[in-house]
Image: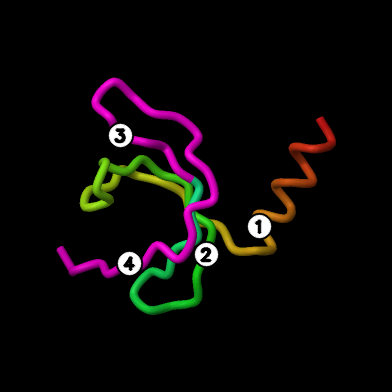
Amino acid sequence: MADIKYEIIQTIAVLSENAKGWKKELNLISWNGREPKFDIRDWSDNHEKMGKGITLSKEEIDKLKVILNSN
């Protein structure tokens, strides 16, 4: 598997924490040196391990915000 490089630019929010201490977070992350995107996924306490997640552009997060605010 290829080495994935990431830099957490900003932690926006911790959405939840499970019994093992992993936290579901909304972060702004640069993946492999690219422009930062919004990212929701589970992280170990030291951010060395991650679970599956979803990455959204600024346009996608803005659209999601509109959809959530309309309900």
Quadrant position of residue 57: bottom right
Name the residue beneath numbered marker 4. 6
How many marks can you see?
Answer: 4
Q: Is residue 44 above or below residue 56?
A: above
Pointers 1 and 2 in contact (C-beta within 8 Å) = no
Residue drawn at x 28%, y 30% is 21
Residue 31 position within the rendered picture, expressed as x and y whole percent measured from the top left: 38, 69
Distance between the Cα atoms at labels 4 and 1? 20 Å
Residue drawn at x 40%, y 62% is 8
Name the residue beneath numbered marker 3. 22
Name the residue beneath numbered marker 1. 60
**In what element is the residue under mark 3?**
loop
Residue neighbourhood size for the residue with mark 1, other residues' Cα within 10 Å, grouped as few (<14), some (14–19), many (≥20): few
Query: Image check: 36 left or right of 19?
Result: right
- Looking at marks 3 and 1 on the same chain, the residue that comes earlier in the sequence is marked by 3
Q: Is residue 53 magenta?
A: no
Q: Is residue 28 above or below residue 33?
A: above
Residue neighbourhood size for the residue with mark 2, other residues' Cα within 10 Å, grouped as few (<14), some (14–19), many (≥20): some
Quadrant position of residue 9: bottom left
- Looking at marks 4 and 2 on the same chain, the residue that comes earlier in the sequence is marked by 4
Amino acid carrying label 1: it is Glu
Residue 20 position within the rendered picture, expressed as x and y whole percent measured from the top left: 24, 26
Distance between the Cα atoms at labels 3 and 4? 18 Å
Name the residue beneath numbered marker 2. 37
Span of residues in magenta: 1-25
